[in-house]
Image (cartoon, rainbow, N blue to C red):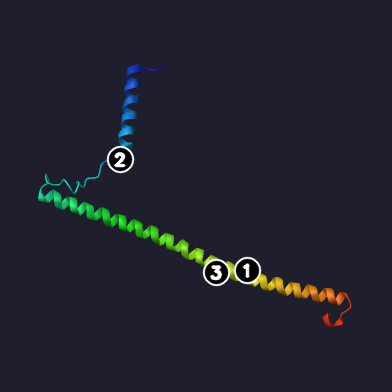
Amino acid sequence: MNNLHPLTIAATGIALVTTVTVAAVPSAALACNPDDCSGLSSEELARDRAEIRRLNREQLRYVQRRDAGYSRGWDAQREHSKTMSAYERERAEYERRMAQWREAVRRCNAGDLRYCAG
């Protein structure tokens, strides 16, 4: 049988839920509000500015990587469009030539020897 007291089990469950909840809550950014930094020392302001610069550089790197990915996608889309346009032109030319050939076969079969390959 289980030797744990029901209150021990309940306390353990509450502690687990509390731990998971606290871990899931995002922590606040450590940068101060630019309109209200008057209570900070010069060292704290310097750290705050450094943190803001670091975050800005991190965001810039993220945006550059994201945009580079978008650019590769756009390049691929443009290349695909060019390829499809070329295919459509070639296919139209093929269909035109096949129509001419079919017409020549029809005329040859109808007795027009000018259209019969000899």
Q: CA distance from mark 1 to mark 3?
A: 10 Å
- Which dot marks residue 82? 3
Q: CA distance from mark 2 to mark 1?
A: 54 Å
Name the N-terminal-most of marks 3 and 2: 2
Name the N-terminal-most of marks 2 and 1: 2
Above or below, 11 relative to 114: above
Q: Nearer the viewer, residue 16 or 64?
A: 64
> Which of the 4 quarters of the picture holds residue 65?
bottom left
Element class at badge 1: helix
Q: Are marks 3 and 2 in contact (CB under 8 Å)?
A: no
Element class at badge 2: loop
Q: Label 1, on which residue? A: 88
- Residue positioned 27% across, 55% down in the render: 56
Of the 4 image quadrants, the one containing the N terminus is: top left
Above or below, 111 relative to 17: below
> Which of the 4 quarters of the picture holds residue 102?
bottom right
Q: Position of residue 59 (x, y in %)?
A: 31, 55
Q: Position of residue 68 (x, y in %)?
A: 40, 62
Q: CA distance from mark 3 to mark 2?
A: 47 Å
How many marks can you see? Answer: 3
Disc 3 packing (10 Å; few <14; some 14–19; many ≥20): few
Q: Amino acid at mark 1?
A: Glu
Mark 3 or 2, which is nearer the eye? 3
Above or below, 92 relative to 63: below
Q: Label 2, on which residue? A: 26
Q: Amino acid at mark 3?
A: Lys
Q: Amino acid at mark 2?
A: Pro
Mark 2 or 1, which is nearer the eye? 1
